[in-house]
Image (cartoon, rainbow, N blue to C red):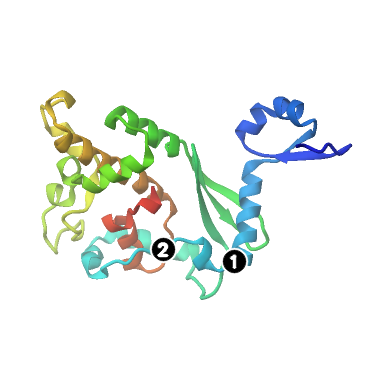
Amino acid sequence: MVVQVPGAKLHVTGAGCDMHRELIKQKLGLEIQFINEFLTQGRGTHWLIGCADDSEICYPEPELDMSEFEGLQANNFLQKLIEKAKKDLGEPIEGQKFPCMMLFMGSGGGIMKIEENGMSDMVGGLWFAGRSFLGLSKLLLGTDDYDEILELASKGRRNNVDTEVKDVLANDPNSPYGQLPPNLPVFPFGKAVDTDKTLADLSEKTWRTPSCSALRTTHSQTWLWRLRLPRSPSSTWAQLFSPRAHSSRDS
C-alpha cells in the first residue's frame, strides 16, 4: 500500500527511471526528482569507503608468484611506463583511502576517481560491459545464462583458441620484449585466424568451452588494463598480465 504525502517527492536514478518517470509518477502519485546516477555512485562510494573496512567492500588482490615476472625487467619500454606511472600517481601511503578508483559494472560500465573531499571524476567508460558480454555469449555459445557461462569457462582450454606468449615470443631471457610466462594469453581468439575450420566443423568440446573461457578472459582483461594502479614494478605488471588475476570476480 502506498501512503501519499502531500508535496512528497520520490528521488530516483538510472536510465529506466528516467524513461518511465511519468508512469512512476502516475502509479505512485508522487513527484519525481531525478538524481544523476554517476553522482550517486561517486557519493555512495565515498561514504562506504569512509565508513567501512576495506575487507568488507574491496576485492582482495590476487595471490601471485612474483618470480614468474622477473623477466619483465629486460623490457625497457615497460619499465619506463612503470616509472612514469609511479611518478604521476605517487607511492601509496599505508592506511590512506583516498584518492581511490572505483569500477562499476552493469549493462555498461565505467571507472571513477574518488577524492577525499567527496568529489568524483569519470576516468573512463566502456560500452562493452555486462550486456555485451551476455549478448556475445548468446551469439557465440548459445547461452546468456551467467552461471552456465562460468561453468563452461571452467571446463574450457583457452590455448585452443587464444594466441599465447609461447606462440609469438621466444623464451629467451635476453629478449628485448622481456621474458613473460609462456602460457600468458596475448590475443584472445587469435588462433581462430589461423584455422580453415568454421563453427560448423568444430565440436562443443573443441570450440564452445574454449571460446567461453577466452570470452571471459577478454572481458576481464579489458577492465584490468584500465583499472589496475601501480604499486611496485613487479607487482604492477604481474597483476596486469597474470592469467590467475582474471577470476570470475573480475568478469
Is residue 224 visible in the rendered image? The answer is no
134 or 195: which is nearer to us? 134
SS for dot 2: loop
How far across and down, in percent of the image, does residue 55 sit?
49, 67
Kind of residue at disc 2: Pro
Q: How many marks?
A: 2
Identify whether 24 is placed above or below 79.
above
Q: Which label number is shown at residue 52?
A: 1
Up the image or down, 241 lies above or below 73; here it is: above
Report the residue at 66% width, 55% height from top.
119
Which residue is at the front of the view, 124 or 178? 124
Residue type for callout 1? Ala
The image quarter containing residue 27 is top right
Name the element at disc 1: loop
Structural distance between the alpha carbons of marks 2 and 1: 24 Å
Q: Residue at x 75, y 29 (%)?
A: 25
Outermost right residue? 6
The residue mark sitting in front, 2 or 1, is 1
Mark 2 crowdedness (10 Å alpha carbons): few <14, some 14-19, many ≥20: many
In the drawing, does residue 27 fall left or right of residue 127? right
* Residue lying at 12% horizontally and 26% vertically, measured from the top left: 201
x then y, percent, for residue 162: 20, 42
In percent of width and height, residue 1 lies at 75, 37
Choose top left, top right, bottom left or bottom right for residue 142.
top left
The residue to which callout 2 is attached is 230
Residue for point 77% across, 37% down: 2
- Tag shown at residue 158: none
